[in-house]
Image (tube, rainbow, N blue to C red):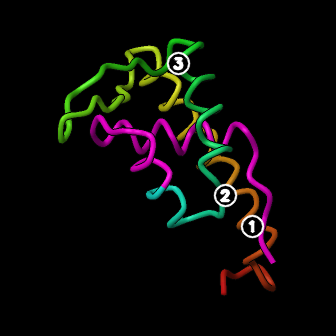
């Protein structure tokens, strides 16, 4: 049994992956897949939306004779990621209190 992934959570995960280092779509997909079940066809619209909202920008770099599109977090994206992280901590703490506390103690 899994938990559904919201658009906001997916946006924050993509920003977090790209914030570590500039990277390309396939690598982003593989990294996120290590945590949640998501397809490339789901992630590319997320990348486009983040780019449209000026949270990510792209540039092309040659790799083995072909151009590969890399993503980079913008200053606006860094601010959004900070806010996502604050909200995630708050949300996680509230859910943890419900799911993990038993008799007033964490298990």
Screen quadrant of the C terminus: bottom right
Q: Secondary structure at mark 1?
A: helix
**Residue range highlighted in magenta:** 1-29
Q: Is residue 94 above or below residue 63?
A: below
| Residue 48 place in picture, x, y as percent | 58, 24
Q: Secondary structure at mark 3?
A: helix
| Of the pair 61 and 8, the residue shown nearer to us | 61
Q: Secondary structure at mark 2?
A: helix
Residue at point 44% right, 57% down? 31
Q: Tell me the chief SS of the magenta region.
A: helix
| Residue 66 place in picture, x, y as percent | 26, 33
Residue 28 — which label? none
Residue at point 76% right, 61% down? 95
For marks 1 and 3, give the CA distance: 35 Å
Screen quadrant of the N terminus: bottom right
| Residue 20 place in picture, x, y as percent | 31, 42
For marks 1 and 2, give the CA distance: 6 Å
Determine if the magenta segment contains residue 32.
Answer: no
Residue 97 — which label? 1
Viewer-nearest of discs 2 and 3: 3
Residue at point 47% right, 35% down? 15
| Callout 2–callout 3 Cβ contact below 8 Å | no
Q: Mark 3 = which residue? A: 51
For marks 2 and 3, give the CA distance: 30 Å
Q: Mark 2 = which residue? A: 93
Is 64 situated left or right of 29 in this image? left
| Callout 1–callout 2 Cβ contact below 8 Å | yes
């Amino acid at each position: 049994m899994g938990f559904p992934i919201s658009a906001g959570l997916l946006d924050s995960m993509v920003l977090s992956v790209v914030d570590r280092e500039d990277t390309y779509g396939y690598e982003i997909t593989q990294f996120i897949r290590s945590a949640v079940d998501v397809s490339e066809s789901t992630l590319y619209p997320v990348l486009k939306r983040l780019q449209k909202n000026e949270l990510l920008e792209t540039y092309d770099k040659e790799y083995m004779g072909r151009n590969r599109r890399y993503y980079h977090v913008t200053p606006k994206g860094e601010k959004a990621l900070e806010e996502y992280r604050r909200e995630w901590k708050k949300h996680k703490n509230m859910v943890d209190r419900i799911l993990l506390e038993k008799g007033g103690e964490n298990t």
